[in-house]
Each structure stands twice: as structure tokens, then as C-alpha cells.
Image (cartoon, rainbow, N blue to C red):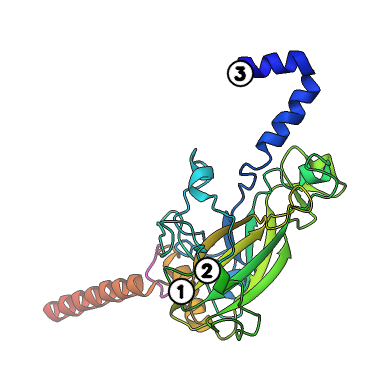
Amino acid sequence: MDSFLKVSRLLGFQYLLIILAILTRGGVDGHSWVDELTCASGPFFTSRPLPPGIPTEGYIRDYVGRQSTQIDQLTTFRILDLSSNQPVCPPGRTSTGYSKKFPKLRATPGDLIKASYLENGHIWQTLAGINGPDAKPGTIYWYGTQTPKSDRDIASVLEWTPDGKGGDGEGFLLAATPFDDLVCIETGHEDAEEGRVGGPCSSYFRLPETAEEGKDFTVYWLWDYTEHFGPPKPGFIEWYSSCLDIAVISKEDALKEIEEARRNAQPLPTDSTPTKALNRHLRRQQLYNERRKQAGEKKSSWFSW
């Protein structure tokens, strides 16, 4: 630190800032990932508000939540090599890992999926010219497969095409969207551009209609952030990834599950009048109590006779 102060006195503070910018330019600048997924179409969207017991959100593998002080280190996965030597998922997240607090998303074939993530300065700094006049916040690519592999490399994923015939034919390019959705901005920087709203950014992709029900659909979120300072030096790349899984169920099963959850959430009526929407277990208990009462009345009338 003392050496930096000496340099600043000799060269001036502005020159020191330039030197620091050059020294830190190659550092990790990404720090964005998928925070939350929701259905934007299909039964889990059209049936909102969903009853208790039906999760409305889904998360990436081993998500720890924004309240964690280590989310940056645990969730950011930087990729500097697009060859077959580079795993597409972070170490320790090559297979599914979810908790009750942060479950996997549940969806039906053909559903539109919305992903939310924070821009973490990558948009407003670009708009402000801080990263340079030619800086770009990058592009997001969504890839998916129902034949996941623990050793899946990024090179094989990048060969997949929308028709599912590219590369090894085991996956699809689901969507390609700009990192900047032209609406979101980091809270506190809404004045960076007219029409910006503080909060998460959004990106969308659609599950294939051919997705097999009763089986997870593995999705890779790949963010090309190579040009965050403008055109890079030849050969330099910088990508980030998040890996997640979606439980695919049929539309019929989803609707049945939602309807049953709604019935279970109905309160027990104060009288014994049959109610169409009663939980079937409560209705069974109601019938049992009514039969016992009827049996007691019959027994009483037989003795009185």
C-alpha cells in the first residue's frame, strides 16, 4: 500500500487510477447467475395463485440464496476455455442437488420458462461508459438435454442446435437472448437510461414439447461476457455458467395436483352438510361420524320400542 502511495505522489492520483485499472482488468468481473426460475405459461402459471404445497419457484443446483455471504464464491463459475477439456458445470454441481428451501422447478412440456438474475453493474456501468465505449454486457444461451452426463463439456453443448440434430444429438439450443433485457437495472441506478426499472433482469426459454414426462430436463445457462471491455485480445474468451434441472410432469397430472392441493386447503365446515370441495380424507371422517350417529339413533329407537 505504501508503494502505491509513493507512486501516486510521483505520478499523480489520476495516473495511479489508470495503473490500477490495467492491473485489475484481467480479474473476475462476472458475478451473475440465475437466481430464480418460474413458469410463464402452462398449468403452474395459469392456475396462480397456486395453493400451499405447490412450489412456485425453482433454482439452480445447490443454490444458497442471496442471504448467504458466500453466494459470490459458491455460485459464480467462470469459463476461459471453450474446449472439450472444460466442464460445463461448476465442480461439485455436475449432478442434481436441491433442498426443500430451494427446490428444482416443476413444469410441463412446452412451458415457457422465465429466469431472473441481477445485472450486478454489468449493464449500468456499460451504459455509463465506465467499461469503455465499445463494452457489451453479453449474450445468454440456453441449452437443454434429458441425457445429462456428469462429465459434460462445454464444447459438446455449444454444438447443439434448435432442432436437436447438432453435435452428438443429445440436446437442444433452447434460446439466445441479450443479457440486457432493456428494462432491468441495478437498484439505485434507474437514471442510467430512461425506462429502466430497478430489480432483476429476465430471460426466457421454452421447454420442448417432446420433453419426456416423469424425467428431469437439465438446462445450462451460458453467458458470453467476453466483450465486457469491448473487442478482446485474440483468443481471449470469458463465459459463465449456471446448471439446473426441471422436473417435467404431464399437464393432466399438474392440474390434478393443483386441484387436490386446493381441496386440501379447504377448511372443515362447522356443520355436517356435505360439501363438494371437501378434502376426501375429511369427507371420509365426516361420513364415518354421520354413520355412527345414525347407528346410535337406530339403537335408541329399538330400545324405546
Disc 1 element: loop
Residue neighbourhood size for the residue with mark 2, other residues' Cα within 10 Å, grouped as few (<14), some (14–19), many (≥20)? some
The total number of labels drawn is 3
Q: Position of residue 245 (x, y in %)?
A: 49, 68
User: What residue range appears in magenta?
Assistant: 270-274
- Nearest to N terminus: mark 3 or mark 2: 3
Residue neighbourhood size for the residue with mark 3, other residues' Cα within 10 Å, grouped as few (<14), some (14–19), many (≥20)? few
Q: Amino acid at mark 1?
A: Pro
In this view, the residue in front, 255 or 154, is 154
Estimate the spatial distance between the alpha carbons at disc 2 and disc 1, rounded to whole Å.
16 Å
Which mark lies nearer to you, 2 or 1?
Answer: 2
Q: Amino acid at mark 3?
A: Met
Does residue 254 appear left or right of residue 114 in this picture? left
The quadrant the C terminus occupies is bottom left
Residue at which label 3 appears: 1
**Mark 2–mark 1 CB contact (< 8 Å):** no
Q: Residue at x 73, y 29 (%)?
A: 19
